[in-house]
Image (cartoon, grey):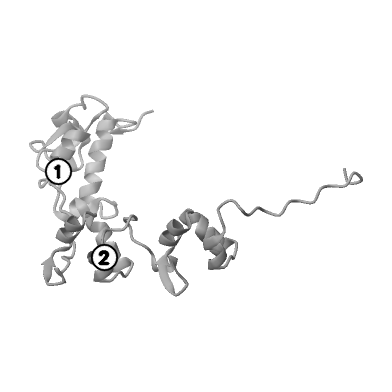
Amino acid sequence: MARTVNGVCRDNKPEWQAWNNARHRCLSTNNPFYPKYGGQGITICNEWADDFATFLTDMGKRPSPKHELGRLDSKLGYNPSNCAWMTRQQIMLRQPPRTKPNRPNRPPITYKGVTRSLRDWAKHLGIGETALGHRLSTYGWTLDEALGGQPRSVSRGYPKKHYVEWKGETRHVSEWAEQAGISRCCLLGRIFRLGWTMDRAMTEPKGQYHRKAKPEKSPEDQ
């Protein structure tokens, strides 16, 4: 036999689920959504609080499976004058706009007598504001490196750990690789995976090294 509330069948009824969810949001402190509803002063009217039949009489059946119980004014509670069956899109349009968290304002940057904001410096250099911020804060570039020259080809900056010294000069591996005519990954592989010296890694032409060939099997092993 189907379970009933005040004589109204409640098994698998979306209207009952909508009513029950609204009750728990507003009244049950154990409900995970209570802090955003009951905890914020959102209530359910006394006529609906314990009477599903009254709720169903006031609201009727939902028009389609796409409709949910929504509030015309999201600041007010659940009652006949403030509730309607709405689609998810209609409900979202009635939600107050979310405020983005305030990002800390970066102080203006002064370089060679010129003071600009980070955004203006990035626009002046022709790079993204985020990229310039990473160069100054994450990768530890000096103002001369970040603002004094042409923007480098790698927008995210060059991590310090990929700077390599060779012949008394320190450069990023990307710059050394360009000078050697090989890719950055190839140069990194030669240095860190194969254990080559910088002299060999920079001077040996690409494709001139191979893995050791496996010894041929003797006829007796075949």
**Amino acid type for the residue under numbered disc 1:** Gln
Which label belongs to residue 147? none
- Give the class, few, some or many, for how many residues have Cα within 10 Å of label 1's Cα (few <14, many ≥20): few
Query: Which of the labelled discs sits on residue 95, or is there none?
Result: 1
Q: Nearer the viewer, residue 151 or 87?
A: 151
Q: Which residue is mark 2?
A: 146
Give the quadrant of residue 16: top left
Which quadrant of the rendered structure holds the N terminus?
Answer: top left
Q: Nearer the viewer, residue 7 or 151?
A: 151
- Residue furthest to the right: 220
Residue 111, located in which quarter of the rendered image?
Answer: bottom left
Determine contact: label 2, label 1, CB under 8 Å: no
As helix, strand or loop, the secondary structure at mark 1 comes to: loop
Residue located 30% across and 69% down the image? 141
Identify the mark nearer the N-term, 2 or 1.
1
Q: Residues within 10 Å of mark 2 (few under 14, many from 20)?
A: many
| Distance from Cα at disc 2 to Cα at disc 1 | 43 Å
Q: Nearer the viewer, residue 30 or 151?
A: 151
Give the image location of residue 78, x and y in percent: 14, 42
Which element carries disc 2, helix, strand or loop?
helix
From the viewer's perspective, tell me whether residue 207 is left or right of residue 120.
right
